[in-house]
Amino acid sequence: MTHKLHFNLSRFYFIYYFFVGLFVPYWGLFLTFKSFTPIQIGFMLSFFQLSRIFAPNIWGWLADRTEKRSLWIKLTAFFGCLGFFGIFWADNFFEVFLIMMAMSIFTSSTLPLAESLTLSHLATTNGHYSRIRAWGSFGFIVASFGFGFVFDLIGIQHLLVTLLITQLLIFIFSYGIPEKAYEREESLNLSFFKILKNNEVICLLSSCALMVTSHGLLYNFFSIYLDERGYTRSAIGFLWSLGVVCEIIVFLSMPKILKFFNFKQILMISLFIAVIRFFIIGNYVDFLTLIILAQMMHAFTFGAFHVASIEMVNKFFPGKNHAKGQALYNSITYGVGGALGGLGGGFIIQTYSASSAFLLSALFPLFGFVIVAFGIKSNKFNAKLFS
C-alpha cells in the first residue's frame, strides 16, 4: 500500500469518527437542551438507527451491482451533508425526527461502503486495517474530549455548526478513496442468499446485534445519565475519550493479541467483559473509579469485538458480496441492535430509571456469549489484515 493511499484512508476514518465523536456523546445532551423527553430522545435516536436496517443494504447492493463503491461513498456523503442542513430550521419533534431520518439514510451508509473498499485495498497490499482504523479512534477522541471543554464554555447549541462542518469534510475527504476492482474468482462469488443460510453467519450477526443493543443504550443515554448525576460536560468528554484511547491500544496491539487468541475467542472474551461493564455502569455510576474502569473496558466491548466481527464478516462475504456483506452487518448490528437498545432504553429510563436500563442491558451480551460459544465453529480465520 502506498503512503498516499494509507494517508487518504486514515484521513477519511479520522474525520468520519470525528463526526461520531461529536454526535454520540453530545447529540442526546443537545436534544435534552431542546427540552425533548427521554422517550422522545430514545424514539428519535432509535429510528435514526432503524434507517440503518435498510439504507446500507440499498447502497451496498448498488455498489456491488455497479462495481463503483467509491462513487457511492461520495454520493452518500454528499446527501448526508445536504440532509443535515434542515436541522437549523427544525424546532419540534416531528421536524427533528424527519431531518435525522433523512441524514441517517445517507450518512449511515457511507462507512460500510468505505469499510468494504478499504478491506479490498488491504487484501492485495501489505497495509494494516487496525492501523488505519486507529485514526478513526483518534478522531473520536479529539472531538469527544476537546469539544467537551468547548461546549462547557460556549454552550451545547453550537454543536450544530460543528457537525455541519464535519459532514462537509467527510464529503471532501471521500474523494481521496480510489476505486478497487472486485475479485473475479468464481469461488469467491457465491450466492449472497446461500451465504445467509450459513448457521455460523446467523450466529455471528445475532451476537453482534445483541452486543450493540447494549451499546445502543450507552450511545443514546450514557452522557445524559452522567449529566443528571452531576458530571460536567468536560468530564463526560473525558470518559468517552478514555474508552477510545483504550480502544486504540487494542487496535495497535491486535497483531500480538492474535498470536494468542483466535477471532471466536476474542468475541467471547469481549462479550463477557461487556456483561461486567454494563453491570458496573448500572450499579456504580457515582463511583468515578469504577466508571473509569468500565470505560476502559470499551477496548474490548467495542475495539476487539469490532476487529474480530468485521474480519469474520469479510471472510464470510468474499468477492462481489463484499459491500452487501458489510452493509448487512451494519444493518443488523447497528440498525436492529442499536434501535432496540436506544428505543427500549428510553422507555425503561422514563418508566423506571437509567440505572435499571443499564443493568438490564448486561443481559444482552450474556446471550451473545452463549450464541458464539455454541453456534460458531470456525475458530481460525486469516488474520492477514491485522498482522
Image (cartoon, rainbow, N blue to C red):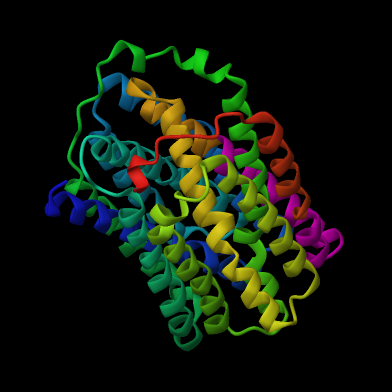
Q: Is residue 366 visible?
A: yes
The residue depicted at 69 percent of the width and 63 percent of the height is: 277
- Write the start and end of the magenta stretch as one range: 332-360
The residue depicted at 56 percent of the width and 81 percent of the height is: 233
Name the side, left or right, on which 56 lies relative to 198.
left
In the image, 235 versus 41, the foreground residue is 235
Name the side, left or right, on which 185 lies relative to 321.
left
Q: Measured from the top left, where is residue 354 in percent x and y?
A: 78, 65
Q: Can you say whether 58 is above or below 126 in the image?
A: above
Main SS, magenta region, reads helix
The residue depicted at 66 percent of the width and 47 percent of the height is: 213
> Total of numbered circles in the picture?
0
38 within the magenta span: no
Q: Measured from the top left, where is residue 147 in percent x and y?
A: 43, 77
The residue depicted at 29 percent of the width and 37 percent of the height is: 117
Q: Can you say whether 13 is above or below 182 in the image?
A: below
Residue lying at the far bottom of the rendered structure = 153
Q: Measured from the top left, where is residue 381 in percent x and y?
A: 45, 34
Name the side, left or right, on which 303 lies relative to 114.
right
Residue lying at the far right of the rendered structure = 352
In the image, 223 versus 252, the foreground residue is 252
Q: Is residue 34 visible?
A: no
In the image, 72 versus 293, the foreground residue is 293
Q: Quadrant of residue 18?
A: bottom left
Q: Measured from the top left, where is residue 158 in percent x and y?
A: 43, 75
Q: Can you say whether 150 is above or below 334 in the image?
A: below
